[in-house]
Image (tube, grey):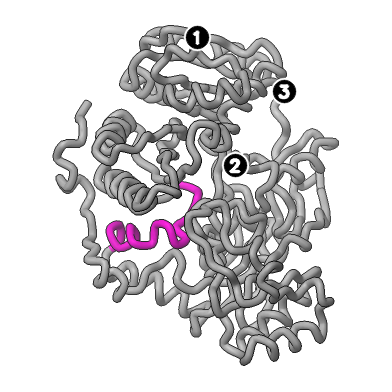
């Protein structure tokens, strides 16, 4: 169907300002938070209701037009990168909180609702929504489901997949499915888990029921500074080994703390090589006991400076620095490329040492900020896109970080998804038979491949063209990787 015909068919039921096709109107949608890759969409549509979403998808299915769903645009893997000959489906106007039920502790919301807005609405009942990505002030719950987002408190409370109960999903044919339920278990295959993290490739989510949990009576943070990365990593292992599951356990290297401190003034020790934040929450008695134990463990592990938040204001200040790490990177570099891989905790020091060697090899600085408790790394490679060839060099650096994650028994993503950024590394992580299975699942939901085409799961031809080989875990592809 010609673009003008498509615009006219959409404007039969959508107002003119909900169907955009002029270049200047399309430009704001050309990328998500991973701004290294850009593409102008053919058309942007902004529905207001589920019924409008259904009608849009039926038109796209009939005309074989690709569709890319977009939430708040805060994604960091190019998952919402538009298709040049397709429709970008923005869900920002589906932003109603439909119900807060304090008895069953659930919230029923539309996909455009901001992550933080759910907790703000539940606050009156002493409840909140646990997953808290650093972008929670802006990111949408629909986008969180697409990428299976986590956050600083996912160690104790889980990722998005562990905190949702039910979805309403529209297929590419315009059929409405209800997946999951509010009971403890639902019959059949676990399609709820399948849909979470599927990056908009299987269906369009129009309604979500999330779990709410009681706000803890008390929370405190221990901020420990270390003069050596290995000591800090040992502290992480020692805390978990002592049977403590912190509400959050985050780590920042020296470059990160310097960038953040100039921006937030959180009180970080600028002499330390690494700063570790470890939070306890629960009843006052539980927190008092756990904080004492954490302090002892940090001291035993070799911390050179230990501070404990004395009140809620100070606790939030400690966390504000961690949550502002990504924007703070903009103070020390024109551009940064944020990676997202996950490794076993025991290999933290080893992989960070490998990243340091790659930084020297490529001549690019790398600022490390990560979820130490679950081994989810977020190296920020600092570069200047205005320098010829520097982005390409940065991408190669990032690809090697992900291959290191695979080698030590990890994975190429923790919460940012695959999108377009890591699609070649999917060829390294998964065997041909596994990729074929992924394509079979995709085909069952979307036989014509119209939903977010070219993302997340590479074609076998792509893997062959890029010469990608499956990287077996523990294979000595990086023989010089430091061992501790």
Mark 3: secondary structure: loop
Please indicate whether residue 401 sits to the left or right of residue 80 in the image. left
Q: Nearer the viewer, mark 3 or mark 2?
A: 2
Of the image marks 3 and 2, the number of the one nearer the N terminus: 2
- Tell me residue 28's x, y (percent): 66, 61
Residue 133 marker: 2
Of the image marks 1 and 2, the number of the one nearer the N terminus: 2
Is residue 111 highlighted in magenta? no
The quadrant of the picture occupied by the N terminus is bottom right
Q: Nearer the viewer, mark 1 or mark 3?
A: 1
C-alpha distance separating marks 3 and 2: 22 Å
| Residue 423 found in image quarter | bottom left
Mark 1: secondary structure: strand
Q: Residues within 10 Å of mark 1 (few under 14, many from 20)?
A: some
Q: Is residue 123 above or below residue 399?
A: above
Q: Residues within 10 Å of mark 2 (few under 14, many from 20)?
A: many
- Tell me residue 116's x, y (percent): 72, 42
Please indicate whether residue 286 sits to the left or right of residue 350 in the image. right
C-alpha distance separating marks 1 and 3: 24 Å
Please indicate whether residue 290 sits to the left or right of residue 397 in the image. right
| Residue 187 found in image quarter | bottom right
The quadrant of the picture occupied by the C terminus is top left
The span picked out in magenta is 414-430
Residue hosting label 3: 217
Residue hosting label 1: 306
């Amino acid at each position: 169907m010609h673009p003008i015909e498509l615009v006219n068919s959409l404007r039969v039921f959508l107002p003119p300002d909900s169907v955009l096709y002029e270049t200047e109107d399309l430009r704001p949608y050309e990328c998500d938070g991973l701004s290294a890759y850009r593409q102008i969409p053919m058309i942007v549509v902004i529905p207001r209701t589920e019924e409008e979403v259904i009608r849009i998808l039926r038109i796209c299915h009939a005309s074989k037009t690709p569709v890319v769903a977009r939430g708040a645009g805060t994604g960091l893997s190019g998952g919402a990168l538009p298709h040049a000959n397709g429709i970008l489906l923005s869900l920002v106007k589906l932003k109603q909180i439909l119900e807060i039920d304090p008895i069953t502790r659930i919230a029923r919301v539309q996909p455009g609702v901001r992550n933080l807005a759910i907790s703000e609405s539940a606050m009156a009942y002493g409840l909140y929504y646990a997953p808290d990505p650093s972008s929670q002030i802006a990111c949408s719950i629909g986008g969180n489901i697409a990428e299976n987002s986590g956050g600083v408190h996912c160690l104790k409370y889980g990722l998005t997949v562990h905190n949702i109960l039910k979805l309403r999903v529209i297929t590419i044919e315009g059929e409405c499915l209800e997946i999951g339920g509010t009971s403890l278990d639902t019959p059949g295959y676990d399609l709820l888990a399948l849909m979470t993290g599927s990056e908009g490739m299987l269906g369009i989510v129009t309604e979500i029921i999330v779990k709410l949990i009681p706000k803890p009576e008390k929370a405190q943070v221990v901020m420990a500074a270390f003069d050596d990365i290995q000591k800090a990593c040992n502290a992480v292992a020692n805390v978990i080994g002592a049977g403590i599951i912190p509400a959050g356990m985050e780590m920042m290297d020296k470059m990160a703390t310097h960038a953040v401190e100039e921006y937030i003034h959180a009180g970080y020790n600028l002499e330390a090589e690494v700063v570790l934040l470890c939070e306890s929450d629960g009843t006052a008695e539980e927190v008092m006991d756990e904080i004492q134990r954490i302090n002892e463990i940090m001291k035993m592990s070799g911390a050179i400076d230990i501070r404990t938040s004395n009140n809620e204001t100070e606790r939030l200040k400690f966390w504000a620095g961690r949550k502002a790490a990504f924007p703070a990177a903009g103070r020390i570099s024109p551009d940064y490329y944020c990676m997202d891989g996950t490794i076993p905790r025991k290999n933290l020091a080893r992989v960070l040492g490998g990243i340091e060697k790659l930084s020297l090899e490529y001549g690019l600085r790398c600022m490390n900020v990560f979820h130490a408790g679950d081994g989810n790394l977020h190296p920020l490679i600092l570069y200047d896109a205005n320098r010829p060839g520097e982005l390409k060099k940065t991408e190669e650096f990032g690809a090697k970080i992900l291959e290191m994650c695979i080698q030590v028994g990890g994975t190429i993503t923790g919460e940012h998804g695959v999108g377009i950024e890591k699609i070649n590394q999917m060829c390294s992580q998964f065997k041909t038979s596994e990729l074929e299975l992924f394509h079979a699942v995709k085909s069952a939901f979307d036989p014509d491949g119209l939903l977010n085409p070219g993302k997340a799961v590479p074609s076998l031809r792509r893997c062959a063209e890029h010469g990608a080989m499956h990287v077996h875990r523990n294979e000595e592809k990086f023989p010089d990787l430091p061992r501790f």
